[in-house]
Amino acid sequence: MPSSAQGESREGAADFVGFWVETLNYATDSGDTEGLKSLAAKDCTSCADFARTLDQIYAAGGHVESKGWELESAVPVADQPETEPSFQLALKLAPQTVYEKKGAKPKEFRGGTQPARIFLIRESDHWLVKQLDI
């Protein structure tokens, strides 16, 4: 994790969001979800859903082909506590081909722009994703 994403400031939280997107892209491309899981709060159901889906695909011999997500902007939502900021995201999703298991017929997803809102929490000396609404 870059040092800029570890800071307690709102800028540090925004940098963490960018790092989280990079980590999601890595997990999607490789099937290695440990890093993604380590960035999620215990009660983040959307985080758990992403990791579980990827774990199932790769465990079944499948894979995902995509250039991933690109974070176009992360705008802080006003009046949020310093230790629990949230951001309105503008994401660009690349087209994706998903092979759910070995030998499966591929599922195609077009990609496009996607708004989202991400909620963070400061735990000890680092940020975690508390919730992601897409």
Image (cartoon, rainbow, N blue to C red):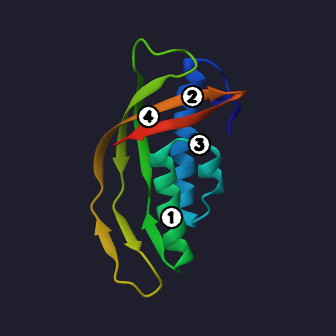
The image quadrant that residue 127 belongs to is top right
Q: Are marks 2 and 1 in contact (CB under 8 Å)?
A: no
Q: CA distance from mark 1 to mark 4?
A: 20 Å
Which element is circle 3 on? loop
Q: CA distance from mark 3 to mark 4?
A: 15 Å
Residue 54 - label: 1
Split into 4 quadrants, where in the image is the N terminus?
top right
Kindly identify the residue that appears in the image at 44 percent across and 34 percent down: 118
Task: Tell me the kind of residue under disc 3.
Answer: Lys
Q: CA distance from mark 2 to mark 4?
A: 10 Å
Classify residue 110 as left or right of residue 27.
left
Which numbered disc, 2 or 3, marks the residue that appears first in the sequence?
3
Task: Tell me the kind of residue under disc 4.
Answer: Ile
Residue at the spot of label 4: 118
On the image, the x and y values in percent for residue 46 come to 44, 47
Residue at the spot of label 2: 121
Q: Residues within 10 Å of mark 4 (few under 14, many from 20)?
A: some
On the image, the x and y values in percent for residue 126 come to 68, 30
Residue at the spot of label 3: 42
On the image, the x and y values in percent for residue 76 come to 43, 21
Q: Is residue 30 shown above or below 118?
A: below
Task: Tell me the kind of residue under disc 2.
Answer: Ile
Q: Is residue 107 shown above or below 21?
A: below
Q: Residues within 10 Å of mark 3 (few under 14, many from 20)?
A: few
Residue nearest the viewer, comparing 74 with 122? 122
Which numbered disc, 3 or 4, marks the residue that appears first in the sequence?
3
The image quadrant that residue 114 belongs to is top left
On the image, the x and y values in percent for residue 124 come to 72, 27
Kindly identify the residue that appears in the image at 53 percent across and 22 percent down: 84
